[in-house]
Image (spheres, rainbow, N blue to C red):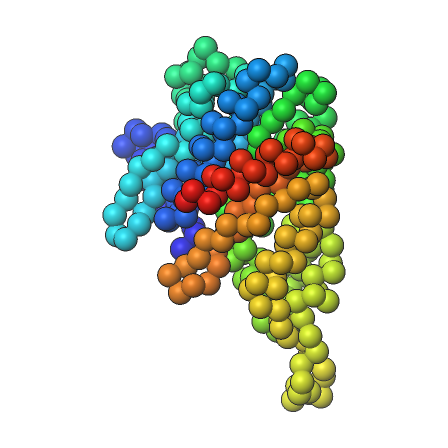
Amino acid sequence: MLEETACSGEMNGLKDRHSFGGAWTLLKLAVLENYLSAFTVALKNQNFRLVYVDAFAGTGRCDVKMAGSTTTVDGSARIALQVNPPFDHCCFMELAPKKLAALQSLATEYSDRSIEIIHGDANSALRDLCGKFDWRNTRAVLFLDPYGLHVEWATLQAIADTKAIDVWYLFPYSGLYRQAAKKAENIDPEKEAAITRILGTDDWRKKFYEPEKQLSIFGDEGETRAASHSQMLKYVSERLKGVFPAVSEPKIFCQSTGAPLFALYFAASNPSPRAFGLAIKIAKGVINAL
Ligand SMILES: C[S@@+](CC[C@H](N)C(=O)[O-])C[C@H]1O[C@@H](n2cnc3c(N)ncnc32)[C@H](O)[C@@H]1O
């Protein structure tokens, strides 16, 4: 369901074809577009260099499959380039070599703009970027739009430490839920490490699991996942609030069954109440407008 489908576009010469997502894809992009526009308007008369960072940039286009048909829309990278007033600098990070050609074409299309394309893992690229800018005179918006459990906690900490980056994070809740198996004994070490990496602690084991009421047939006392979706999401929110000075209530995108798929969070890293107050107000406005 969340998987990227085969990129048939490469065969017919359309290098920017990128199929993924569903209805939530259009909603998250609408939120991003509206926030970016409000952000550059709000800061246009201040003396900051404005930077947009797309850590999971894709190709700049999305082929979104909904109700049996496919709609092609601008992806986050292209949306960011169209914002007016424009960002002073855009930084696109992407791991898949095949998507880089599309990003290079996008940069050629916008050759009058300052665009940086980084090929590599978003975590190391972001940690480098956090140390690279002078955050006293730079303000940035970062979009974290991974397919799965890819954003490491240490990366979020580095972002918060800049005190200058606003973050939209499409948290892959269904990925977390799938990896946190119903019976704790079924969580293999790799899955356990992946969950700990995205939540920054192994405390989730205590929060999500309880001892089973009955002993197993071997007489062992196992543990079972007892936390509800809303308790697990609340835990994710609390973790984010532990590192960012201000975090919005997430917008939850659900499957047709009602099960949550993604939680779209906004987090501000500027500790000034005036700065994060304004950022959260704009973020709430764009979420409520959906
Ligand atoms: C959901 S798509 C992003 C879509 C994009 N935001 C848009 O709106 O068009 C996720 C992207 O992340 C890339 N990716 C996966 N793992 C990555 C990693 N560790 N670092 C950077 N990019 C990664 C994938 O190749 C894919 O293009």
Image-based side of 238 in relation to 29, left or right: right
Q: Is residue 67 visible?
A: yes
Image-based side of 259 in relation to 225, left or right: left
Above or below, 194 relative to 268: below
Residue 138: give x, y in percent of width and height: 65, 21
Residue at 50%, 28% (x, y): give it.
38
Residue 165: give x, y in percent of width and height: 64, 31
Residue at 59%, 39% (x, y): give it.
280
Quadrant in the picture for the N terminus:
bottom left
Residue 191: give x, y in percent of width and height: 63, 59
Residue at 69%, 61% (x, y): give it.
204
Q: Nearer the viewer, residue 126 or 140?
A: 140
Q: Nearer the viewer, residue 193 or 276?
A: 276
Q: Is residue 186 visible?
A: no
Residue 265: give x, y in percent of width and height: 56, 45
Above or below, 112 relative to 3: above
Quarter where residue 127 is shown: top right
Residue at 66%, 87% (x, y): give it.
214
Point out the residue furthest to the top here. Answer: 112
Quarter where residue 163 is shown: top right
Count every numbered label the image shows and give the total. 0
Quadrant in the picture for the C terminus:
top left
